[in-house]
Image (spheres, rainbow, N blue to C red):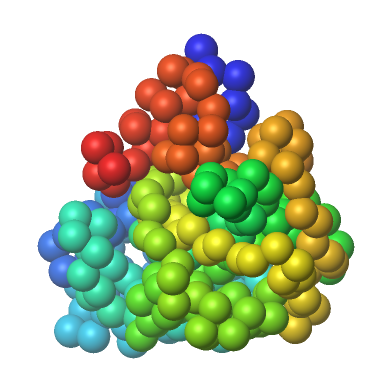
Amino acid sequence: MTRWRALHEATRAERPRVPFVVAGRAVGSVAVDELPGLRGLHPGLRVAADRVVLTAQDPGAALATVNARLRDAGRILAWRDEPFALPDPADGSPLASMERAAARFWGTLTLGAHGNGYVADAAGRPVALWIARRSPLKATDPGRLDNLVGGGVPWGQSPLETLVREAWEEAGLQPAELQAARAGSVLRLARDIPEGFQQEWLHAFDVELPPGRVPVNEDGEVAGFELLPLADALAAVDEMTVDAALVTLDFAARHGLVDDDALRAGLRALRRHPGA
């Protein structure tokens, strides 16, 4: 068994759930103990013991009504007024838009974009990683360590576009500095969290920064940055968010910086394309 905690956390599912079906497609899941509170919220929402089915000509509008009622009942927390896609998890194609905070309640697929900011030696081999510490005021994982850049992909943006936007907001990097960013793996998370269930595809990118380029936070969501040698960054993964830990471990494995067969096997199981 691998010693890396994040690999176990990535697929932890303990709360019983039933499928959530929209437009005939299973797009997520609902906790069984939430089913009684869903009855009567909308005429197009059918709640059965083995599934919840939404049948509405405009699923986005129906979900807006249902989600607002769940928010008012205290079942959806940390409302953001930020639209996220409701995708078909089979291929990622969007079926509607919905409030970001509701995705965890429904267990629907979300996308994340994370950037490993690294410094390389003269031969181009990574030798250090820029690690962020999240603001103590963040609603989720306050004060924990994080990647240089990380954020959810909103409605209308691609993972790369989100990376570029977040790189400015979180690290003060100009778009030109992201032109050489290289796409890495796409890691799949499916795990219970306090807000519900996180079903997410984490798009990892590698962002090389020249020596002396120091990131500076612009939006108040990062308390500070530290440039850590690779060994120190790997030693700190248990202090990171699960998302950031997985992206960091994947970076190390892809670049041949860690010799751990169990880690490589665990990451292959999480990758959307295992051969990546």
Q: Is residue 114 above or below residue 7?
A: below
Give the x, y percent position of residue 223.
84, 66
Q: Is residue 236 above or below residue 162?
A: above
Give the x, y percent position of residue 28.
33, 55
Quarter occupied by residue 54: bottom left
* Foreground pick, 129 / 119: 119
Give the x, y percent position of residue 218.
75, 83
- In the visual, does 245 lie left or right of 240? left
Residue lying at the far front of the rendered structure: 122
Quarter occupied by residue 150: bottom right
Residue lying at the far top of the rendered structure: 1
Q: How many marks?
A: 0
Q: Is residue 221 above or below residue 271?
A: below
* Foreground pick, 135 / 205: 205
Tell me which residue sits at (58%, 51%) in the image.
Answer: 122
Tell me which residue sits at (60%, 19%) in the image.
Answer: 3
Q: Quadrant of the C terminus?
A: top left
Res 2 visible: yes
